[in-house]
Amino acid sequence: MARALPFIGAGLLAIGLFAFPFLAGQNSYYIHLVQMMAIYAILILGLDIVVGYTGQVSLGHAGLFGIGAYGAAVIFHHYGLGVWPGLLVGVIVTGIFGAVLAVPALRVIGPYLAMVTLAFGTIIQIVINEWTGLTNGPLGVTLPPPRVVDFADWRSFWQGTLGLKAAEFQRLEFYYLCVLLMLVAILVVNRVVRSQYGRAFEALRDSPIACDCMGVSVYRYKVYAFVVSAALAGLAGALFSWSERYVSPNTYNFELSILFLLAVILGGRKSRAGPLIGAFIIVYLPNVLSDIELVRIMAGMIAAAALVALAIIALRSREKLVRALPPVILCLAFLPLTLNVNNVTDYRLTIFGLMILFVVFYLPDGVMGFLREVFPVLKPRHVTAAQPAAASAIFADRGLADAKTLLRVESVVMQFGGLKALDSVKLAIAPGTIHGLIGPNGSGKSTMMNVLTGVYRPTAGAVYLSQHRIDGLTPSEIAGKGIARTFQNVQLFGEMTAIENVLVGLHHTFRSTLMDAVLRTPRRAREEAEARARAMAILDFMGLGQFAGTEARNLPYGKQRMLEIARALALDPSLLLLDEPAAGLSAPDIAELVEIIRKIRGHGITLILIEHHMDVVMGLCDTVSVLDFGQKIAEGPPAKVQNDPRVIEAYLGGTVAEAAE
Ligand SMILES: Nc1ncnc2c1ncn2[C@@H]1O[C@H](COP(=O)(O)OP(=O)(O)OP(=O)(O)O)[C@@H](O)[C@H]1O
């Protein structure tokens, strides 16, 4: 039943939307309202990709919407081209601008990105206003009634069959075009976010550094997300201009961007139903706010609902009562406020702002999130895998194991201001070995990891994997060459399940394109099934099979560390870097970890191990290098290093046996 629910929902939505004009008695006002909802829903579905999936803030979507609208209007104004070319131009031009908007998102995050995207929207509005030759400036562009289908026979047949006047039929045609495109947008977005592209979007939101180190370029996928999102905004904009039949620069302002953001947050991130709820709210909200009587009635209803909710909470839990008081007081205060003013339209931005605050504090997952809590059947299903692949399929040989030295670090210097975190460090890692990297806190071990994986570019020196120089490459390029890593402070993709985390590591196995994802081609289906089977086998190998469908953030700490290793193994690494994998683990978990590390080495994977647990290092490593103040002070087999006086002095502060206790 739960499996069929999205299909039943989509089917009912489609039937409802197609029947609506007849149910509404061809009432043009209601048809237009639903049409506007469909148009806004297309944009909000796209905005959810950027906001919900990649976790970026965009206040520039009103600008993108404006570009789409003007794309359609301008080609009509100058060349007399109609609806279809308008939609095409709207989508393509806005998609290009989406890539432009992605550029700042690659450099700044959070409030800074909000500011930059806001500036983008403002610039677009000013350009539309000032470039009179192209856009007709403040006067705007007027369009004729849209003509969707140009076959005279077809039109007269259906017009006669339905018994409609020519204008009514034309209006109906455009309505159906809008709802059909909205349904297509739902389908497309659904397929994209469930593909490896959607997983990449979520991965870069939860941990950009881990995403890059899994070979999934944050840079590239942020651009993809913005382009897809912008193309949908452009489609919505082009439909909007033909729906309103008039475009002017003032429409695409800051307020509209806030409304769009409100719709995503209020409707609920990461769902297809959320944008529909959001679109409903933003179409109806301005209408409600312009009618003071209606506002007062709604304020009364909200106050009554808040009081009822307060009474229920008071009966259930005292603790929650304190938390519930501020929103209840806010809801109650709204009523006398509306009774004292004759017009709330002027306060609409304040109301939008308060709504955003309210949702962020009390409904972080929006209306859909709330509904999912109340009706768990609405929660998205976490797909795992039908059958794990054979264990032999987990490890693929990259053919680097024959090299004499797998990794060579030549006189690497890493300087931060006046501090040399690494000072002319040389390392040579033999294939098939476990190489320990130890040293006191702050000696440069994690910095070395970051240099090896491309997170830091060394100030001087060189790093070679087999014969290939890799310093200067990006983390995702280095990951692609076969170096995988875990992190000192666990960097999982928290909102994704265990199997999805591993699937991000398997991203490199996919050859299917965005188009394959949209069309759900057999190639994509095959790749997805193979990757899921392999991910399941990796999870089984790490003893995590039973947690496949559990969100990473809900796993116990020890399992999270194991999952990081599982995800790293998915990269088919030749070299696996483990940064303090035993930190925070219990004794049985450490014993299990040691066993697993041995098994991994047994499959021909070379490891570099940073660890403070000396018994783990001494028991596992073939060679140990010791760093102190960024310099290598000793190297050799554990037994030799253990007794090196410089090591004892610098790092252990006594004997190894004492330190291990
Ligand atoms: N991005 C950075 N900017 C400035 N200084 C840094 C940066 N990263 C590391 N450092 C400094 O470099 C030195 C080495 O740090 P690093 O984290 O590599 O040490 P570590 O051996 O891994 O220590 P620990 O065992 O505590 O993790 C420290 O003094 C640290 O403060």
Image: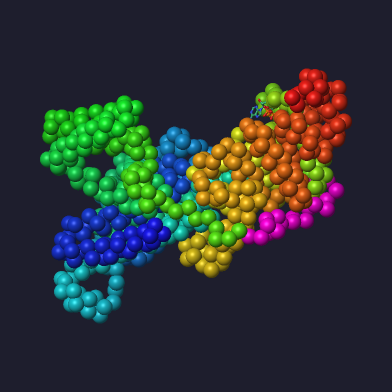
Residue 2 lies, in percent from the top left, at: 39, 57
Q: Which region of the structure is painted magenta?
A: 389-406
Residue 336 lies, in percent from the top left, at: 15, 29
Quadrant position of ligand 1: top right
Q: Nearer the viewer, residue 220 or 69?
A: 220
Question: Which residue is rendered at x = 75% and y = 45% of the image?
Answer: 598
Which quadrant holds residue 349? top left
Residue 364 lies, in percent from the top left, at: 38, 39
Type of secondary structure dominating the magenta stretch: loop
Quarter containing the N terminus: bottom left
Q: Is residue 473 left or right of residue 279?
A: right
Q: Please determine whether, in this image, residue 146 is positioned above or below residue 120.
A: below
Residue 405: say if magenta. Answer: yes
Q: Nearer the viewer, residue 138 or 494?
A: 494
Q: Is residue 229 left or right of residue 578?
A: left
Which quadrant holds residue 259? top left
Q: Please determine whether, in this image, residue 283 is positioned above or below residue 656.
A: below
Question: Which residue is rendered at x = 44% and y = 34% of the image?
Answer: 111
How many marks the image carries: the answer is 0
Q: Nearer the viewer, residue 316 or 292?
A: 316
Question: Which residue is rendered at x = 31% and y = 35% of the image?
Answer: 358
Residue 22: say if magenta. Answer: no
Residue 300 lies, in percent from the top left, at: 16, 36
Let me know if residue 96 appears in the view.
no
Q: Is residue 181 left or right of residue 444?
A: left
Question: Which residue is rendered at x = 43% and y = 45% of the image?
Answer: 52
Q: Is residue 279 left or right of residue 532?
A: left
